Amino acid sequence: MSIHPTAIVDRQAEIDPSVTVGPYCIIEGPVRLAAGTRLYQNVYVTGETHIGENCVLHPGVIVGHEPQDLKYRGEPTGCRIGRGTILREYVTIHRGTTPDSTTVVGEECFLLVGSHVAHNCTIGNKVTLINNVLLGGHVEVGDGATLGGHASVHQFVRIGELAMVAGYARVRKDALPFSLVDTKGLVAGLNRVGLRRAETPREQLDEIRRAYRVWFSRELSRTQAIEQLASELRFPMGLRLLAFLQAESRRGLAGRSKKSKPDIQTCDEPA
């Protein structure tokens, strides 16, 4: 175990012998650091925080501190970071606010400088938050999603898997899986680049494209669109899109941008 002599480490902490703790770090409370994890200088980790294997926390990172919630009264809550996640300079991740709740960041995520993950957020695997992204409390972000720099996401919003959110976006409603989201938080098309990088099979890509056209059709109500999709979708990614549309939404679902791509043109528009 390599712990710099200037670091302050609580006796309650459980630290794997292979962990590296840099100068002036503070580890406070029953923190658990798994094998291979490295903390650069001036990192603060506190509370019921569990950090997985081979994570890297750069200078100034804060994980597990009290939530920015006036209702919080010191209840026992936690924070969990999955293996292989990288937290760049000055990332802040706050623990849950309701009793026994947890803020979760998945595996192999990449959170860039100044990103903020508020209390009770749930972030999937391989998510990228570009510099200064702000996630309000209880936000959910699906696997493989990317949020551009300075994007801000309202409390209780869901970001679907493999969504690509524009920089400086204001996301106030749920962003559909596999979508491109513009600066107004509206769906502007399919995230073709992300789908290609994810090696999406052609038949699944075609099904997602058809599902988008059904969903945004002017001729169908949302109830009718869901009924039609439930009868047509067969492949795993399409079924996950359907589950997202059917799930309870606290904020409602994002609408279509007027500058949307041909992927979501309605049936009365040229392809």
Image: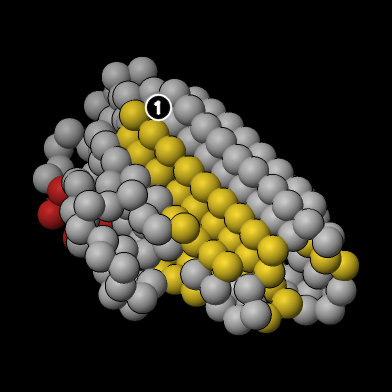
The residue lying toward the viewer, choosing from 141 and 66, is 66
Q: Is residue 167 visible in the rendered structure shown here? A: yes
Residue placed farthest to the top in the image? Answer: 259
Measuring 68% from the left and 69% from the top, which residue is drawn there?
Answer: 9
The residue lying toward the viewer, choosing from 218 and 119, is 119
Measuring 20% from the left and 58% from the top, which residue is drawn there?
Answer: 71
Residue 164 image position (x, y, % from top left) = 50, 37
Q: Is residue 10 left or right of residue 264?
A: right
Which SS class for mark 1?
A: loop
Looking at the rendering, which quadrant does residue 182 occupy?
top left
Q: Is residue 118 above or below residue 30?
A: above
Q: Amino acid at mark 1?
A: Ala
Q: Is residue 75 left or right of residue 163?
A: left
Q: Residues within 10 Å of mark 1 (few under 14, many from 20)?
A: many
Q: Where does label 1 land, which residue?
A: 169
Q: Is residue 225 left or right of residue 194?
A: left
Measuring 33% from the left and 35% from the top, which residue is drawn there?
Answer: 171
Q: Is residue 239 above or below residue 11?
A: above
Measuring 71% from the left and 44% from the top, which residue is drawn there?
Answer: 59
Looking at the rendering, which quadrant does residue 216 occupy?
top left
Looking at the rendering, which quadrant does residue 56 occupy?
bottom right
Residue 120 image position (x, y, % from top left) = 36, 61
The residue lying toward the viewer, choosing from 246 and 44, is 44
Q: Quadrant of the C terminus?
A: top left
Q: Is residue 125 visible in the rendered structure shown here? A: no
Q: Quadrant of the N terminus?
A: bottom right
